[in-house]
Amino acid sequence: MYNEIIKLRKIDRTYDEVGEPIETSTEIEVYAKILSIGQQEFYMAHTAGLKPELKFEIADYLDYQNESEIEHEGKIYRVLKTYRKSSKALEITVYGGVDLATS
């Protein structure tokens, strides 16, 4: 059941006239369900230097537009990979878990 609300965040970086970066973010809220990271997936990612923390599934893959971050329960996660699970659903594996209060 898709009962968790997550925010898909896209960060766009442009530069002003003197070359200073300007970041703008756009976000949309979608319903998702939380899945666990499988043991094999965790260890395979770990050997490549990656540390997946959570996996979300959204009902409609069209809601995802290559966003680089996900916000959930006051934490920001970076997207590690996506996987189209069925004709509609999309799994998004994330890492990072930076608390918004400390970032």
Image: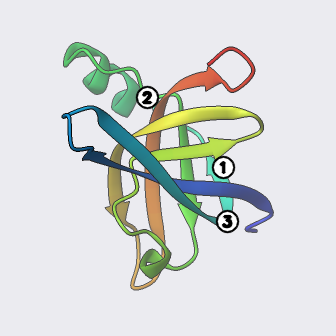
Q: Which residue is mark 1?
A: 34
Residue furthest to the front in view is 17
Task: Give the secondary structure at mark 1.
Answer: strand
The residue that appears at 58% across and 25% down in the rendered structure is 97
Q: Which mark is residue 23?
A: none
The crowd level at tag 3 (other Cα within 10 Å; few <14, some 14-19, many 20+) is: few
- Report the side of 14 relative to 68 (left or right): left
Query: Could you tell me the amino acid type at mark 2?
Result: Pro
Distance CA(mark 1)–CA(mark 2): 13 Å
Q: Which mark is residue 29?
A: 3
- Report the side of 59 relative to 74 (left or right): left
Q: Can you give x and y, in whole percent of width and height, for residue 96 in the image?
A: 49, 24
Q: Which residue is mark 2?
A: 52
Q: Quadrant of residue 22?
A: top left
Q: Can you give x and y, in whole percent of width and height, for residue 74 in the image?
A: 75, 34
Task: Give the secondary structure at mark 2.
Answer: loop
